[in-house]
Amino acid sequence: MTSVSPDARRIWRGVRLPLAVVLLLVLTGTLLVLVQGEQTTGALEPGSYEPGGGRALATLLEREGVKIPIVRTAAAAKGVARDATVLITEPEYVPKSTFAEIRQNAEHVVLVRPSPGTVEEILPGVRVNGQAETETRAPDCEAKDPVAAGEATMGGLKYSATQPRALECYGGSYLEVPDPQGTVTVLGTPAPLTNEWLADEGNAALAMRLLGKQERLVWYLPTAADPSLETERKPLSELIPAGWSYAALQAGFAVVLLALWRSRRLGAVVTEPIPVVVRAAEATEGRARLYRKAKAAAHAGETLREATRARLRPLLGLTRDAEPAALVESVAGRTGRAPAEIGALLYGDPPADDAALVRLADGLDVVEREVERS
């Protein structure tokens, strides 16, 4: 049974279509970048026009006279936080000491979707209480801003607090924690602040009331590249942005499906029956006929002697490189024959004709049997 492996040509035919698609995507992306030029991208970026960006909200706030300093480092955020509203888009990158200083100086701090570990670290008494689908929700609370805005697109993570004055709205996806240092608002989703959802329901009203109370809104976009952040104190799982783990899982599934698809394209193993079965005796007989036709009695005799010597050495406990004299002495000792007779049989002159070849074969066979029986 044999199997047929795909050669280079078959492999190329199988992968050329996926490679062409990948190349087309790369060229299209490069062309778009060259045509559009440099643009701000990213979640809640105030200059981004993407669905998840914050360009629309930043424009509305600036039209109302709100100054928006955009900062990306902890040092810059702490320097401009006094008497301002501070929007922290990625709380996972902000250590407890930095948040405490910002909270002490700012009038109002807004956290967007802090993870369970982050919110418990920087806001003692606040914890994540599950997750809800992002959809239109009623305030169902007494907080002024949600009540004035009405229904909004909320959901995501749900929070609860042990502080008696804390207010939970929109099913827990909006948490307002007042204290003497200043109010802290926790949002379970960035949806009402994004370009995609700002114009729906009361999202714009909620965002404007939440972020436009002070003359300045510090739009803080923390990153892991900020050298002043003590990211080494946070586990890697908390530094991964929300949704990336699901994207990695989906990519893994896609790779597995692609591998399964490609393996099916290669097909099953092909088996072929052996066309002719040649018995060992027939092969030996055919080789003998060839020797006879070529009148190669000497060559055939040497072949028989070498085969006999190879079988005798293990029987006598000799190695493959044993000297001829050692082999002759051992065979003579085991059979009781004279060493000269054994030497002539194993290493003598080649047979001159077919009759001599037959006598040599018989003699070798007899000696080998005697050694085996001794």
Image (cartoon, grey):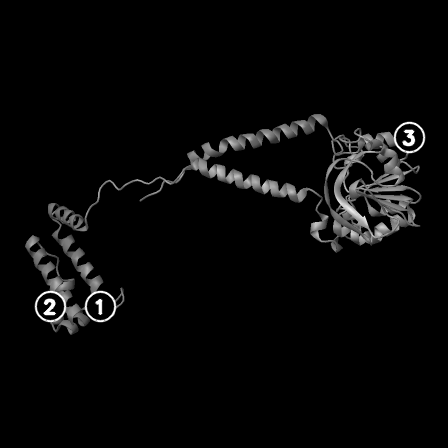
Relative to 67, 345 lies left or right: left
Residue type at mark 2: give it. Answer: Glu
Marks 2 and 1, the one that precedes in the sequence: 1
Q: Say which residue label 2 marks.
A: 341
**Disc ID at residue 64:** 3
Few, some or many residues within 10 Å of mark 2 (<14, 14–19, 20+) = few
Q: Quadrant of the C terminus?
A: bottom left
Looking at the rendered image, the disc whose residue lies closer to the viewer, 2 or 1, is 1
Residue type at mark 3: give it. Answer: Glu
Relative to 49, 333 lies left or right: left
Marks 3 and 1, the one that precedes in the sequence: 3
Image point (75%, 52%), residue name: 117
Picture coordinates of residue 160, whole percent (x, y): 80, 49
Label 2 to label 1, Cα distance in Å? 19 Å
Q: Quadrant of residue 27?
A: top right
Q: Say which residue label 1 marks.
A: 315
Marks 2 and 3, the one that precedes in the sequence: 3
Label 2 to label 3, Cα distance in Å? 121 Å
Picture coordinates of residue 95, whole percent (x, y): 80, 52
Residue type at mark 1: give it. Answer: Leu
User: With respect to residue 253, does 354 lie above or below?
Assistant: below
Mark yes or no: residue 127 visible.
yes
Front position in the image: 246 or 134: 134
Image point (75%, 55%), residue name: 233
